[in-house]
Image: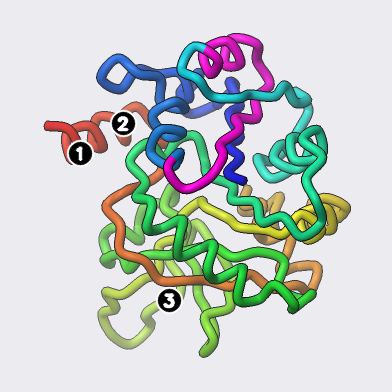
Amino acid sequence: MIIIPARIGSTRFPNKVLVSIEGIPMVIRTAQAVSSLDSVVIATDDESVVNIAKEYGFRAVMTSKEHKSGTDRVYEAATILNLKDDEIIINVQADEPFIEKEVLESVYEKIYNYKDDSKVLAASAYKIISNPEADDPNIVKVVTDSKDMALYFSRSKIPYPRDHHFDSYKGHLGIYAYRMNSLKKYCQFKPSSLEKIEKLEQLRILENGYKIAMTKVETESFGIDTPEDLERAIKKHIL
């Protein structure tokens, strides 16, 4: 099951999930990009998104306006859908209209490989980015251990290259795979201190002593956080 959290409110880019990309709302473009892989449900806090989803043939469910993270919204939707404990859920951000299906397949395979490991609550992905790209705080960086388990995520440039130039940073992609029972456990944790500081919900998992399995992928996609990001994405993928 693929669930796309689609919150209308956004401080940096209001109503971005409905912005038009070649005449199609961004959230619908994202749903269309992944719909060949599995069933897609859009989890939203606004009736207009529900209506637009229906217009394009996608199922949508209404969720609370009070959620502080997309993962919490995904969990409410999964509960409404009455998904089984062992169901694998892929959380795809609504601002990834150009995501390749191979990325989702890689994340799915990663969480499946850890289906019997209760310490691994989620799987996610990263791509290698350059030193200049890593300067952008909107691009989240991740450092991993020898088994590609996430050690930390930050908007800052990590690791810090003290003695020499470094050009192989790991740029995190906002795509997660969970088992339903792991998602439930995650959402029972209170928002953590690091999560609040960095404004990165995935840190809640690490701060509570659990793991996120990472997989390296090749992708041209990136999350659209600002109008400038949208303009850059359209030029790169459409023109």
Residue 164 is drawn in which quadrant?
bottom left
| Amino acid found under the numbered disc labelled 2 | Leu
Near mark 2 (Cα within 10 A), the count class, few <14, some 14-19 or many ≥20, is: many
Marker disc for residue 59: none
- Tell me which residue sits at (60%, 76%) in the image: 113
User: Which residue position is annotated with label 3?
Assistant: 160
Residue 193 visible? The answer is no
Instruction: Check if residue 41 falls in the magenta segment.
Output: yes
For the point 58% across and 44% down, the residue is 2
Q: How is the image coloured?
A: rainbow
The segment highlighted magenta reads 36-54
Q: Position of residue 215 (x, y in %)?
A: 47, 71
Q: Residue at position x 50%, y 68% from top? A: 142
Instruction: Give the mark, 2 or 3, whose residue is nearer the N terminus.
Output: 3
Where 17 falls versus 112 (above or below)?
A: above
Q: Going by the image, does 41 lie left or right of 36?
A: right
Q: Is residue 67 left or right of residue 111?
A: right
Q: Work out how far the residue at label 1 is from the one at label 2, CA to CA, in angstroms.
A: 10 Å
Which residue matches tag 2? 230
Check disc 3 and give the amino acid type. Tyr
Instruction: Residue under label 1, please give it.
Output: 237
